[in-house]
């Protein structure tokens, strides 16, 4: 019997079409070529979270668009490389449960074995809703029944305060289709009417998508409005909605001001760290960000943010360069010293 040495090989041998997504920080597609390199340990996992890779594996047969989805959480080593033993153990569990016919509907016993394996995990509900919408759009499947209801709501047909029948899945369906010019204009024109009860889940849904310029500009205008400035929770949600849109120059300039401002809250800094890490490919912005975190005089907070950022391959060299910088403030140096005094090494 041929030994199956990777998840990619298992999927290919089953005759499946498949796609791979990271669902740890945000929802990011991983190309087959990139995933193959990750499995071969040719490159570190690009989106680690707490030393794990959180994957969604979507696969289907050519004659159907009804996908199967596995949510898999695999450990990474100190270099961010996939733990080969854990990956191989996961494959063995799959083969034990299903054999190589992984697209056959599993029996109740098989399904139980699949869900109770140590590498299975259940994403948060808000992330599941976002992921379902993204998959349906990408595979050209029907959106949920809540989609048209939310479109009617955005047109103002239901009344802005009549939001209790709005489904989170419909909100995510809109986010997944927001690059349609007509829908972008609809959202851009009416986002200021949306009450906080709807605006917050909408922002969380939008964080996974690169937003059209008009939507981005409307969000920025809303962030700067007086009534939002007085509500930190809503303000933070609006900031979060721009997570995948920092290539927009206005959004980039706004984020730069947040990074540099002495008034940026701890909660905002945590969001910037967890969802805006692409900004820190600019080493000067990273330095300013860490200086800002250090100003809050919370060694534990700084250590957690530093260790999280240094685990991300795209910015790890920039994070490590801070350790050698001669231009650090006293506060930043003190916080870095705390890390080294309380751990054997920086991973």
Image: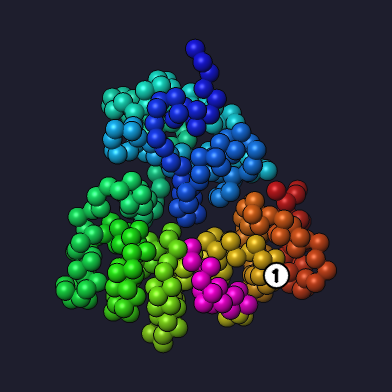
Asked if residue 249 lies left or right of residue 129, the reply is: right
Residue extending farthest to the right is 326
Seen from the viewer's position, the closer of residues 338 and 289 is 289
Circle 1 sits in a helix, a strand or a loop, which is it?
helix
Residues 85 and 276: in front is 276
Q: Position of residue 241 (x, y in %)?
A: 43, 67
> Residue 16 falls in which quadrant of the image?
top left
Q: Which residue is mark 1?
A: 284
For the record, the magenta segment spans 244-260
| 104 vs 68: above or below | above
Residue visible at 54% across and 60% down in the picture? 274
Residue at the far left in the pictured view: 158
Seen at 28% across and 35% down, the residue is 64
At 34% from the left and 28% from the top, the residue drawn is 103
Q: Is residue 13 above or below residue 123?
A: above
From the top left corner, tell me how far across and down residue 292 is, in percent. Answer: 65, 73
Q: Residue at x 39, y 53 (%)?
A: 127
Q: Is residue 344 left or right of residue 214?
A: right
Residue 28, image x, y percentages: 48, 52
């Amino acid at each position: 019997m041929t030994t199956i040495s990777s998840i990619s090989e298992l999927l290919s041998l089953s005759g499946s079409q498949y796609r791979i997504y990271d669902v740890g920080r945000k929802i990011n597609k991983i190309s087959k070529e990139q995933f193959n390199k990750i499995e071969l340990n040719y490159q570190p996992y690009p989106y680690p979270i707490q030393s794990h890779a959180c994957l969604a594996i979507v696969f289907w047969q050519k004659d159907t668009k009804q996908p199967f989805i596995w949510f898999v959480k695999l450990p990474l080593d100190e270099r961010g490389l996939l733990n080969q033993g854990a990956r191989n153990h996961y494959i063995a569990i799959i083969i034990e449960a299903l054999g190589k016919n992984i697209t056959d509907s599993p029996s109740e016993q098989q399904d139980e074995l699949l869900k109770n394996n140590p590498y299975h995990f259940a994403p948060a509900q808000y992330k599941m809703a976002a992921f379902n919408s993204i998959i349906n759009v990408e595979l050209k499947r029907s959106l949920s029944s809540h989609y048209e209801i939310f479109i009617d709501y955005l047109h103002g047909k239901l009344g802005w305060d009549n939001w209790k029948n709005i489904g989170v899945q419909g909100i995510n369906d809109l986010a997944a289709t927001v690059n349609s010019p007509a829908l972008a204009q609809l959202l851009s024109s009416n986002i200021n009417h949306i009450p906080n009860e709807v605006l917050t889940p909408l922002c969380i849904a939008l964080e996974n998508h690169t937003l059209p310029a008009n939507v981005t500009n409307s969000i920025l205008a809303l962030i700067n409005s007086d009534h939002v400035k007085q509500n930190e929770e809503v303000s933070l949600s609006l900031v979060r909605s721009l997570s995948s849109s920092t290539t927009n120059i206005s959004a980039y300039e706004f984020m730069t001001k947040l990074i540099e401002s002495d008034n940026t809250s701890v909660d905002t800094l945590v969001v910037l760290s967890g969802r805006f890490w692409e900004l820190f490919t600019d080493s000067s912005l990273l330095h300013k960000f860490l200086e800002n975190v250090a100003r809050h005089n919370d060694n534990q907070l700084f250590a957690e943010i530093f260790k999280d950022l240094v685990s991300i391959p795209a910015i790890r060299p920039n994070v490590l360069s801070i350790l050698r910088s001669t231009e650090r403030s006293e506060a930043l140096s003190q916080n870095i010293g705390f890390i080294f005094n309380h751990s054997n090494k920086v991973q």
